[in-house]
Amino acid sequence: MEFNISSVKNEKLAAEIQQKIDTRTKPPGSLGMLEEIAMKISMIQQTETPDITNPTLIVFAADHGLADEGVSAFPKEVTPQMVFNFLNGGAAVNVFAEQNGFDLQVVDAGVDFEFENCPALIDKKIAKGTANILQGPAMTPEQCEKALQAGAELVVEAHLKGTNLIAFGEMGIGNTSSAALIMSRILNLPVSECTGRGTGLDDEKLKNKIKILEKALDKHPDAVNAMDVLQCLGGFEIAMTAGAVLKAAELKMTVLVDGFIITSAVLVAAKLYPQLKDYLIFAHLSDEYAHGKMIQSLDGKPLLRLNMRLGEGSGAAVALPVVRSGVNFLNKMASFEEAAVSEKD
């Protein structure tokens, strides 16, 4: 699948936006990263008066064959159980999405469970979980392509409903393992530098997880380019997220990036289309080990550091009011001239 993602570069407009930012009634730079947000979204929307309309958060859920190897503190059964929790409004992401004005959608990307009579669940199931990557590729090329397409289609639907800012969450026991493997291969780092405790592994189980992931990486020496890495080491929810962020950038939407797993999908997508970086705002620095390195590799800077490592899109949901603040000060704050306030000499 191909995408047409253009750079937001426009030096004349950037200078005009910076002038507007600097002439609000404040010392230059005194709103810190809010000023960077204002510039980022203004450039994405190519306007001095940006707005946020119908923000949407899509949670992709899928299972991983590698979970059978004991890389998580929780069993695979938790994935469908949490999907029901999302649908019933009981998860953290439900609370924060409702609180901060996100339209929340839940997608079955590949859960190892048959959901029946769940009209609120969007069915994009590719298969009942990926294959065990200790035995072969996580997905076939056709499955990977289908997942990319499904993610892109959901973004198109959101865009048609007026969404211009979008975020993604995930649920899938074992998916921090896939994210760590993707990071290791794309950034050429040892597995040990990319692997964290995930759902809360103790020291002994973390060591075991690292050994399993090292074996998994060795199993796929030819998975080097981004698409092969995604197909061999990824998950259906990660592949759908990669397709979704690329389509969002193609449609000139702001992408508010959540935590470790979602950033791994962005890592793949940005390797394919480097200009994607123009459209990204990183919501927070996860407490999951190595997330910071991943963000740095994407030239990003996280808005928040709350020691969160829940996933689900919860960090993006919490960060939305901060993003709104960056847009609102630019549009609503008086200039020195309007307020009759003397500027700095």
Image: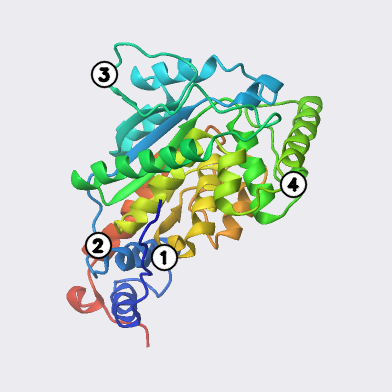
Please say whether residue 313 is visible from this viewpoint. no
Q: Secondary structure at mark 2?
A: loop
- Disc 1/disc 3 C-alpha distance (Å): 40 Å
- Viewer-nearest residue: 119 or 86: 119
Mark 2 and mark 4: Cα distance apart in space: 39 Å
- Density class for disc 4 (Cα within 10 Å; few <14, some 14-19, many ≥20) is some
Decide: marks 2, 4 in contact (CB < 8 A)? no
Decide which of tag 2 and tag 4 comes sooner along the chain.
2
At a point 42% along the width and 23% down the height, the residue shown is 91
* Distance in Å between CA atoms under marks 1 and 4: 30 Å
Q: Indicate the colouring scheme.
A: rainbow
Residue plotted at (56% across, 44% down): 230
Instruction: Name the front one of labels 1 and 3.
Output: 3
The residue positioned farthest toward the bottom in the image shown:
345
Who comes first in sequence, dot 3 or dot 4? 3
Instruction: Using the image, tell me which numbered label, if any, was put on residue 50.
Output: 2
State yes or no: discs 1 and 3 in contact (Cβ < 8 Å).
no
Q: State the SS at label 3.
A: loop
| Comparing labels 3 and 2, the label whose residue is closer to the camera | 3
Vertically, is 296 above or below 227?
Answer: below
Q: Earlier in the sequence, mark 1 or mark 4?
A: 1
Left or right of 138 on screen, residue 329:
left
* Marks 1 & 4, CB-CB < 8 Å contact: no
**Which residue is more in the foreground, 37 or 45?**
45
Residue linked to disc 4: 193
Q: Which residue is mark 1?
A: 36
Q: Amino acid at mark 3?
A: Pro
Q: CA distance from mark 3 to mark 2?
A: 35 Å
Q: Which residue is mark 3?
A: 119
Alpha carbon distance from label 1 to label 2? 13 Å
